[in-house]
Amino acid sequence: MKKNLFILILILYPKPSLADSFDFRSITWGMPRVEVLAAEKLKPLKATDDYISYKFSLFNQEVFLLYEFVSNNLLSAKYVYENLKKENLDKILDILELKYEKRKAGSDFYLYENNSTIIEVEYGNDYLKVLYKSKRIQDFDLEKEKRRSENEKKHLLSIF
């Protein structure tokens, strides 16, 4: 009886999966470069202070993966397919539809999101770019634009 009750509790109240705690692959936004390198099982193609790139096969097709960092914090990741096969586009869009909420769609783009991530999908005849951005990057972009505008004003004031 106790065993059946325990099994029923496990079924009704499942423990959140480990995958639910990640924002992208086995990564969370804001991770430092060193943690991303440790978490990613692939061998980096290139690593700089601002980027880490990888190249691997997904759906029997070569894909590039690029992580972008600002002040040693991960803010975005991008898949880039060149010479995209149509069936792979359909598979990827189906997966995104299942995993994220669709916000917009156009003739060559889609926009998805969840609580922590915005996903921008752009495609053409022979390429696909899937950009995953931390929602915190919006704040960073706004702050960067504000600083740029303030610097521009200071520069103009110094000229006159």
Image (tube, rainbow, N blue to C red):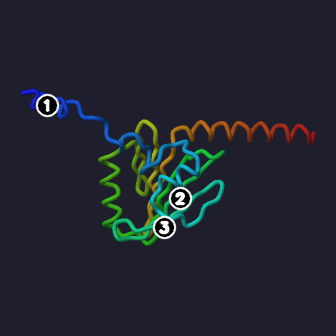
- Which residue is under mark 2? 66
Residues packed near mark 1 inside 10 Å, few (<14), some (14 to 19) or many (20 plus): few
- Which residue is under mark 1? 8
In which quadrant is the N terminus drawn?
A: top left
Left or right: residue 15 versus residue 33 is: left
Amino acid found under the numbered disc labelled 2: Leu
Distance (Cα) linking label 1 and label 3: 44 Å
Q: Position of residue 97 (x, y in %)?
A: 32, 48
Left or right: residue 104 versus residue 150 is: left
Q: Name which residue lies at 13% across and 31% down.
A: 8
Question: Which label sits in the foreground, 1 or 3?
Answer: 1
Distance (Cα) linking label 2 and label 1: 43 Å
Is residue 150 or residue 48 the one in the foreground?
48
In which quadrant is the C terminus drawn?
A: top right
Residue 93: image tag: none
Asked where in the image residue 153 lies, by quadrant, the reply is: top right
Residues packed near mark 3 inside 10 Å, few (<14), some (14 to 19) or many (20 plus): some
Left or right: residue 102 versus residue 2 is: right
Compared to 2, does 154 lie above or below? below
3 or 2: tag closer to the N-terminus:
3
Asked where in the image residue 108 lies, by quadrant, the reply is: bottom left
Asked which secondary structure carries label 3, the reply is: strand
Is residue 56 or residue 108 the one in the foreground?
56
Is residue 99 or residue 111 the one in the foreground?
99
Amino acid found under the numbered disc labelled 3: Lys
Q: Position of residue 61 (x, y in %)?
A: 38, 70
2 or 1: tag closer to the N-terminus:
1
Residue 55: image tag: 3
Residue most extreme to the front: 2
Left or right: residue 88 versus residue 82 is: left
